[in-house]
Amino acid sequence: MDNPPQGSSHASSFHLPPPLVYAVPFVGALLLDRWHPLPLLPRTIGTWIGLPLLALATIGISALLRFRRARTSPLPWRPTTALVTDGPYRISRNPMYLGLTLLYLGATALANSAWPLVGLPVIILVMNVVVIPGEEARLEAMFGPTYREYCARVRRWV
């Protein structure tokens, strides 16, 4: 965990809450499933797949707790006061987003609907093209070489 240079608490003017990037398509897919059901798996198999995925999604909670411990905001549009590189951030630069993706997949399996899978590539694209690059640019501007070294040794997702 590193602190930014003095006077460099930059927050983005673009606010696209990542949980909404996942929630809106998921809810839309479930509504579509009400009118045009598209079962994914037999219910028992969906449960056996969905529950472990939900358990793995707790990586996002662990990541959130690391932010709290560092006394910095996990909200991308709020100023960053520390670079968190420990805990799940040792294996992924975006464990909260990884957790949201696992949650999405687990909930999809439990809902037994293939419709949410249609939206997942769009979600990943939005995260990779819109959300994450903006965050990474801000972090690089704030933490410079420290952040670049972190990026060189830790993958974006896994």
Image (cartoon, rainbow, N blue to C red):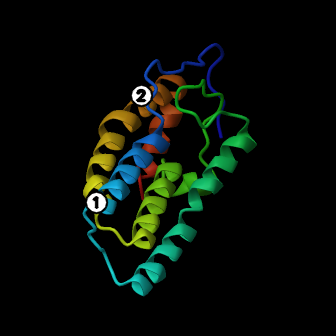
Check the picture and name the quadrant holding the N terminus.
Answer: top right
Earlier sequence position, callout 2 versus callout 1:
1
Q: Amino acid at mark 1?
A: Trp
Distance from the alpha carbon under mark 2 to that under mark 1: 42 Å
Q: Which of the pair 31/72 is nearer the observer?
A: 31
Residue drawn where x is 59% and y is 25% of the image: 78
Between label 2 and label 1, give the one nearer the viewer.
1
Q: Amino acid at mark 2?
A: Ala
The residue beneath circle 2 is 137
Which label number is shown at residue 134? none
32 left or right of 17? left
Q: Quadrant of residue 137?
A: top left
Q: Is residue 4 above or below residue 53?
A: above
Q: In the picture shown, does residue 114 fall above or below 101?
A: below
Residue 6 vs 61, above or below: the answer is above
Give x and y (percent) for residue 154. 46, 51
Examine the image and state in which quarter residue 83 appears: top right
Asked if residue 124 lies left or right of residue 61, the reply is: left
Query: On the image, numbered disc 1 is attached to which residue?
Result: 35
The structure residue drawn at horizontal position 54% and vertical position 28%, both measured from the top left corner, is 143
- Mark 1: which secondary structure? helix
Q: How far from the left and from the top, in percent, is residue 56?
A: 54, 68
Q: Nearer the viewer, residue 64 or 46?
A: 46
Identify the secondary structure beneath mark 2. helix
Q: Residues within 10 Å of mark 1 (few under 14, many from 20)?
A: few
Q: How many neighbours does mark 2 have within 10 angstroms: few (below 14), some (14-19), or many (20 or more)?
A: few
Which residue is drawn at the image coordinates 42% and 59% (left, top)? 158
**Residue 69 vs residue 120: left or right?**
right
- When the figure is inspected, residue 140 is found, relative to residue 45, above or below; the finding is above
